[in-house]
Image (tube, coloured by chain):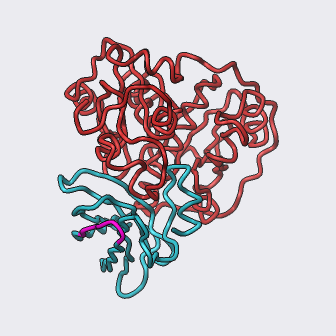
Chain colours: A red, B cyan
Amino acid sequence: MSRADVLVDADWVEAHNGEPGLVLVEVDEDTSAYDKGHIRNAVKIDWKKDLQDPVRRDFVDREGFEKLLSERGISNDDTVVLYGGNNNWFAAYAYWYFKLYGHQNVKLLDGGRKKWELESRELVTEVPQRPATQYHAQEQDASLRAFRDEVVAAIGNKNLVDVRSPDEFAGRLLAPAHLPQEQAQRGGHIPSARNIPWSKAAEEDGTFKSDDELRTLYGDAGVDFSVDTIAYCRIGERSAHTWFVLRELLGQPNVKNYDGSWTEYGSLVGVPIKTGDES
Amino acid sequence: MTSDAQATAAGCGAPAGGAPITDAGNQAVVQGRVTKAGSPVVTGYARLLNDDGEFVAEVPLGEDGGFRFFAAPGTWTLRVLAPGGIRAEQAVSAAIGQVSNLEVAV
């Protein structure tokens, strides 16, 4: 796996947009951005409505994923290029999700919606009509997803990478600073976790930093590349961004995303929590 | 607290703009509006940086050029990015129960 296999840039999208076998997908939590304007031919996936189970705290299951992709007109052998707002957080989450369900050919648009907008590239409101398909998903790939017991067992043994902001890591904030600070769970972080905010992996325009810069970033922060890694944040989408960096860009073999993340861990009874800036 | 703010609290989405908050409640609100020659800048991003210049949060500008953050008490830098290579910065301090309003002209 290398950068060219998993990332495309805006020029590539403009050059190939409309070709058969290529599907652009905008993924956001707030899909009003898509409705106001999106890249030509892009379909939308709503992170909350389309990818989360409406009742249980979990993803849509395999059948739900098959139904979603079939409705969107995505085939198993299509190349899917994902992009979105929030520096591609939700697009990276969807990427992880496509991999979980076994989609082979999926890529991110480097810089996402932000870079596209800042470069004043074309956005349209016309919604593409794609004929429905019969999409077949695989069983979830358990090697990509961490659950709570595995996370507790990883304390002091594996790399735990907390990708939230330093204030969230220390317990001074319970959510990112663009959201109200009203969550009830405890603040802090999982003991032994290294705080490497997702944003350190990205340039200001939302593109990923170079492989060399990324390797130095995680190495200097205490990530041991010979050990398995679990990334987490608050609800698992920022850590999907870091999961993408570690596994897809840097080629680390055993990296899992803990999508339960702090909203789960910080509400568990009896688990250790550390507050303050130290790991 | 507005219902908009509560609706987004379950996720990490970046709600754009929205009506300005006048009562901060128990939040430390930093909000404002970005204008160019008196008109709102509707395509662009507001980034909140901490004292060390490290990124903390980012939102897309709203239809009124507005942005809002729920910060922690302290001093922050607000940076605006907009098409055409536009960048602007302002320092701002935040306190619990206080709304800090910024007018950013680019």
**A245 over A132 or under it: above or below:** above
| Side of B36 relative to A96 (left or right) | left
Quadrant where the C terminus of chain A lies?
top left
The x and y percentages for residue A100 are 60, 25
The quadrant holding residue A197 is top left
| Of A165 and A140, the residue lying toward us | A165
Q: Which residue is located at x 33 percent, y 66 percent?
A: B96
Farthest residue to the bottom: give it: B38
Farthest residue to the front: give it: A270
Assess whether residue A45 is covered by the magenta stretch: no
Assess whether residue B94 is covered by the magenta stretch: yes
Q: Can I make out residue A248 in this image?
A: yes
The x and y percentages for residue A174 are 41, 48
Quadrant where the N terminus of chain A lies?
top left
Q: Which residue is located at x 70 percent, y 38 percent?
A: A53
**A143 over A169 or under it: above or below:** above
Q: Which residue is located at x 63 percent, y 26 percent?
A: A103
Q: Can I make out residue A92 in this image?
A: no
Give the magenta range: B92-97
| Of A109 and A92, the residue lying toward us | A92
Q: Which residue is located at x 43 percent, y 60 percent?
A: B59
All told, the count of numbered labels is 0
The quadrant holding residue A181 is bottom left
The x and y percentages for residue A237 are 50, 40
The x and y percentages for residue A149 are 51, 19
The quadrant holding residue B74 is bottom left
| Side of A192 relative to A269 (left or right) | left
